[in-house]
Amino acid sequence: MSLRGRLIVTRPAFRLDLTLEVAPGEVVALLGPNGAGKTTALRALAGLTAMSEGQISLDGQPLHVLAAEQRPIGMVFQDYLLFPHLSALDNVAFGPRCQGVAKAEARRTAAALLERVGLAGHAAAKPRQLSGGQAQRVALARALAVRPRLLLLDEPLAALDAHTRLEIRSELRRHLADFDGVTVLVTHDPLDAMVLADRLIVIEHGAIVQQGAPGEVARRPRTDYVARLVGLNLYRGVADGTGVKVGELLLHSSEHLDGAAFVAFPPAAVALYRTRPDGSPRNLWRARIDGIERHGDNVRVHLDGPIAAFADITPAAVADLDLTPGQQIWASVKATETHAYPA
Ligand SMILES: Nc1ncnc2c1ncn2[C@@H]1O[C@H](COP(=O)(O)OP(=O)(O)OP(=O)(O)O)[C@@H](O)[C@H]1O
């Protein structure tokens, strides 16, 4: 079961144009900032948003010619959209019933699916009697009940609190691993994407800007959005074999490259000094402190200068260095903590 297609949706102030190819059993996450077009892409796959041009095929059969209700898809929405007046069992049985399955058989299928998601004991409960995590499980069971060949998940964990989210994320991962059709999920959350997906497709302004295995995307971001998402300082420059020239600054790394290159390093790899350090580390520059904010247990210092960078240091280091906004400081990062790759 494979999905292929070119999705084009044109609106007055927005154009989505994506070429997608997803293998059987593969889980792909569409990731991107607000308004990038993730939901539009998902809705176009579902037949809920009309495409202006393009075509989609599933297992070699055209999908875009089918009305939404005829498409062999299962969908989980962010707020689940369970029918409030139906029990969990009847919510799950609803899809098979619509497909013409006899009532008793539809309910048997639904009961088996509820058991699979760990809710056998809640079959009679109405949606309002379920917790967020339970409602999410019912929504997944309902999506699977129609034996879909394409599973579409729109921010499937967004409505859950942090603790439940952790639990449901790993459960969902197991269910997706058992599903042999194509899964496309939309998320804002890099962790959901990293844990759930085999491949990330990053969308910005309606177009794919980067795609690849989660680890690869995290190690080698290609846009500022991806770099921020995975918490790296990222620059584009020109490599000359010994380092990457970014503006006036030459940044050394352990890789030897030539030509257009990206160079990235984590904020925690940046060390700050009041006076020029001895034994000059290879990457050293004079920076101005542009801002200081809490960042988890650490402090994130915003640096301006030949390059804009974030440095994560401990609160004790902030006190020792007596840092204040506007102050000039030395910043360094070891070549071994700097990663360069072709642009
Ligand atoms: N029904 C609509 N009518 C007109 N414009 C729309 C409609 N839905 C979305 N848009 C616009 O289309 C663009 C893409 O929106 P979309 O919801 O697909 O983005 P998204 O990546 O899913 O964003 P978010 O993460 O905020 O949900 C945005 O500019 C949005 O304002």
Image: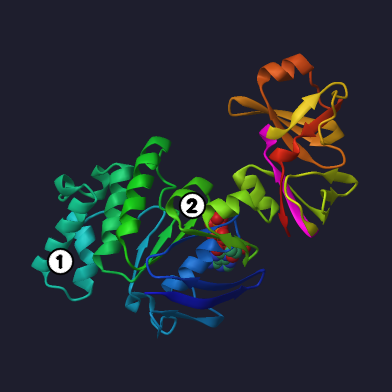
Look at the numbered discs 1 and 2 and tell me whether their residues touch, using CB distance below 8 Å: no
- Name which residue lies at 42% across and 54% down: 78
Tell whether position 12 is magenta.
no
Q: Secondary structure at mark 2?
A: helix
In the drawing, does residue 40 fall left or right of residue 204? left
Kindly tell me whether mark 2's CB lies below 8 Å from ligand 1: no
Query: What's the CA distance linking mark 1 and mark 2?
Result: 32 Å
Q: Which residue is mark 1?
A: 106
Relative image position of residue 183 (x, y in whole percent): 40, 64
Q: Which residues are magenta?
A: 259-268
Relative image position of residue 159 (x, y in whole percent): 41, 46
Q: Which residue is mark 2?
A: 193
Q: Quadrant of residue 282?
A: top right
**Residue type, mark 2 in image:** Ala
- Name which residue lies at 32% across and 44% down: 133
Relative to 268, is 74 above or below?
below
In the drawing, does residue 200 fall left or right of residue 227? left
Tell whether position 260 is magenta.
yes
Position of the N terminus, as image quadrant, is bottom left
Tell me if residue 189 can be seen: no
Relative image position of residue 247 (x, y in whole percent): 88, 49
**Residue type, mark 1 in image:** Ala
In the drawing, does residue 151 fall left or right of residue 36? left
- Name which residue lies at 26% across and 44% down: 130
Q: Quadrant holding ligand 1?
A: bottom right
